[in-house]
Image: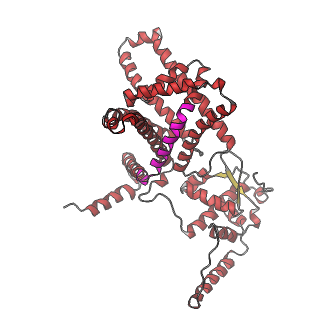
Amino acid sequence: MIDTGQLIGTYRQLIWETDVHQVAWWQALLIRAARLVYVLVRDLLDGRLTLHAMSLVFTTLLSIVPLLAVSFSVLKAFGVHNQLEPLLLRFLEPLGPQGVKITDQIIGFVDNIRVGVLSALGIAFLFYTTITLIQKVEWAFNDIWHVDRARTLAQQFSSYFSVIMVVPVLVFSALGVTASLTSTTIVQAIMAIEPFGSLYEFLSKLVPYLLIIAAFTFVYLFIPNTRVRPGAALTGGVVAGVLWQTTGWLFAMVIANSTSYAAIYSGFAILIVLMIWIYWNWLIMLVGASIAFYQQHAEYLVAGQKDYRLSNRAQEELALMIMTLVGLRWYQRQPGWSADELVNELHLPVHTIQDMLRVLECGGLLTRTTDAPTTWVPARPLETTAVKEVLEVVRNACKGARLVPRRSPETRGTQEVVEDLERAVDAALRGRSLKDLVMAETPAEAPTSLANPGRLQRAP
């Protein structure tokens, strides 16, 4: 009889307790893949990805016509607006005959929108509806990447409009170049020669995959409000692109050609199938974003644990390490630390570093700069900042009122213990400033200019 507990224990030991740096490269690859599949299934069962996907379905239904109308107006200036319908038809191809009906209806709605005769309010609403969709996508990606700070209004204006204006032109230009190259006499003559003809046929089947992978990679690089490594974005783009292309035929066989939807929903069957298809596509995109995140932040690949919870002692130590690192760069007149750099230096999850940075900022110890990406510098001179102040900032970081339990006569001894601890801390840290910690990490041959870093300047 198979012992289930023993199997689970063996699995956990093999997948989660094996040091990937001590095994062969192919074993490390398989272990990382198993960990990734586990955390992805865990995230899907948790419901956050599916909740974002459902929200994006509703926003897409409201935004698809304005988005296509804006893209149509941009593409019309380049003379490639006639390719909008074939591209939309290809996107809805897994819906079968219903995809053709939906494409005709959407194109009809777009044709009815006359941008030239719309009022200023109508044009503003057109762009607002379009931008709302991209904004919702950014919110979903920021949640996946544990980023709690959205782009500023100026950043949203520049980023979103570049996506709306530039991406359609690039996509259709690429398609146009491919079509024009195929129609040339030289290419036709080369295709008639084997094995170039077979190679071209293979590449023609591969091009849709490459285009969708490039589109997903672009989205994963530029939509999250954080710096995404190209390798991580490409990994997520490859997985999402292959999933999107290969599951289209499965959707067409299982759902689009099913007669049960028409029997149950009657005239609403087209809308229901369209909503399912849009939901499936958004879910694939969010899964790809999660893969990119876990590829870049492997420290989150932990069984049964989504968020790191540091102990009180570990939080105090982390605060002192961050202040020391920031102070060291400040005295060396180097650029400040960004959150991503601190993550790579301290090997901790990004949200843990961001939470501590916010605590130190609220405590008046750090301030952020206006650089891109944001960096952190001391908010006041380190030589006048006592080490104990850092510990007090971390201990008093909880929001809301400070609750003090009522002491009964039987528990007054606890007050004496707390007071003894405070006196011991005062005695141990008396006269020690943050500059002392920084200078302890400074090499002996460091220049004497470290002692006079100049006046601290707050970022506006």
Find out whether residue 92 is within the magenta segment: no
Quarter placement of the N terminus: bottom left
Q: Give the range drawn in magenta.
A: 42-66
Q: Residue furthest bottom?
A: 409
Q: How many labels does the image show?
A: 0
Q: Which residue lies furthest to the front in this view?
A: 267
Q: In this view, does 389 lie to the left or right of 263?
A: right
Give coordinates of residue 347: x percent, y percent.
54, 56
- At horizontal 56% and vertical 58% (from top left) the residue drawn is 352
- At horizontal 57% and vertical 54% (from top left) the residue drawn is 343
Question: Who is closer to the viewer here, 171 or 115?
Answer: 115
- At horizontal 64% and vertical 83% (from top left) the residue drawn is 419
Question: Who is closer to the viewer here, 223 or 9?
Answer: 223
Q: Which residue lies furthest to the left in this view?
A: 1
Is the magenta region chiefly helix, strand or loop? helix
Q: In this view, does 193 lie above or below 294?
A: above
Give coordinates of residue 176: x percent, y percent.
52, 19
